[in-house]
Amino acid sequence: MWEAIWQYEFLRNAFVAGVLTGFTAPLLGVFIVVRRLSLIADALSHVTLAGIAAGLLLGSAAPAAASWSPLYIGMSFSVVASLFVEKLRAVYRHYEELAIPIVLSAGIGLSVIFISMANGFTTDLFSYLFGSVSAVSRADVWTAFAVAAAAAMVILTFYKELFLLSFDEEYARVSGVRTTLIHFLFIVLVALVIAASMRIVGVLLISSLMTLPVAASIRIAKSFKQVIGLSILFGELAVIAGLWAAYELDWAPGGTIVIAAVVILLFALGWKRGRQR
């Protein structure tokens, strides 16, 4: 695989996009898991799928729109849905968890409608669902790079505020943290990361890359910063091992990356149990 990366541009694109995804997904996943919002990635990924299906349908119905990338339409759907989640969390203040299944249901419903209108699955839609090494373009790499840079900048700038919000939202609000702004920035970032990662991991599997490395690191790390560092390390290992397996075995990279993350989690659980004996 390593020799082929230097020969073929599509492999280089897939590798770089994968490394960027292995950084951003666990980085945001740490805060998602700590805030007990793990299902939000599933909800936004299904809405993103609806946007992609709508983009493919629009491209087939209107030739003028055929040049529009479904990636950006899916990204728009995901950002709008993320804002809707925050609005619903404010409406159902005492039942905030209701916001996620509402958006998840809407995403599934719209996806089924748009896919049926497009007469079922196409090759493009299948690659968005489960990822594809050959589908990653140079534009996708630049999009993933821009999203990764934005995520790193927001986390570095608002690390203290995000830390307080993750563990004690009421204390953060009383302490003067601009909770609405921080919530807005974070949820939009999650939406953008999910949409930007769909080419390499797939819409239906990106939530796994946001949670499995975090689950492994929580069993080993001794501080919150260690959880972040180990999550990113495990995410990168899962992506690189998954891409290698996908190339050698000609399998969908989304599936191999997720299985690699599961293997890392099992090793972490076994290592922790061995240390406790």
Image: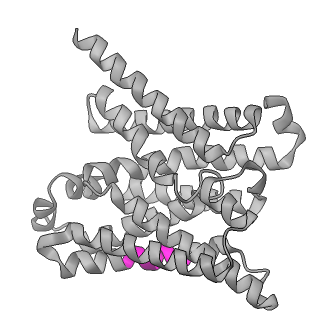
Residue 197 horizontal side relative to residue 6, left or right? left
Q: Main secondary structure of the magenta part?
A: helix
Residue 90 horizontal side relative to residue 206, left or right? left
Q: Is residue 73 visible?
A: no
User: Which one is nearer the viewer's eye here, 259 or 73?
Assistant: 259
User: Which one is nearer the viewer's eye here, 198 or 56?
Assistant: 56
| Residue 175: x %, y % from top left | 12, 63
| Residue 185: x %, y % from top left | 39, 69
Q: Is 61 situated above or below 80? A: below
Q: Is residue 23 visible?
A: yes
Tell me the residue at 85%/35% (across/down). 4
Tell me the residue at 32%/52% (across/down). 31
| Residue 172: x %, y % from top left | 16, 61
Tell me the residue at 36%/33% (across/down). 217
User: Which one is nearer the viewer's eye here, 163 or 201?
Assistant: 201
**120 in the magenta segment:** no
The range drawn in magenta is 76-83
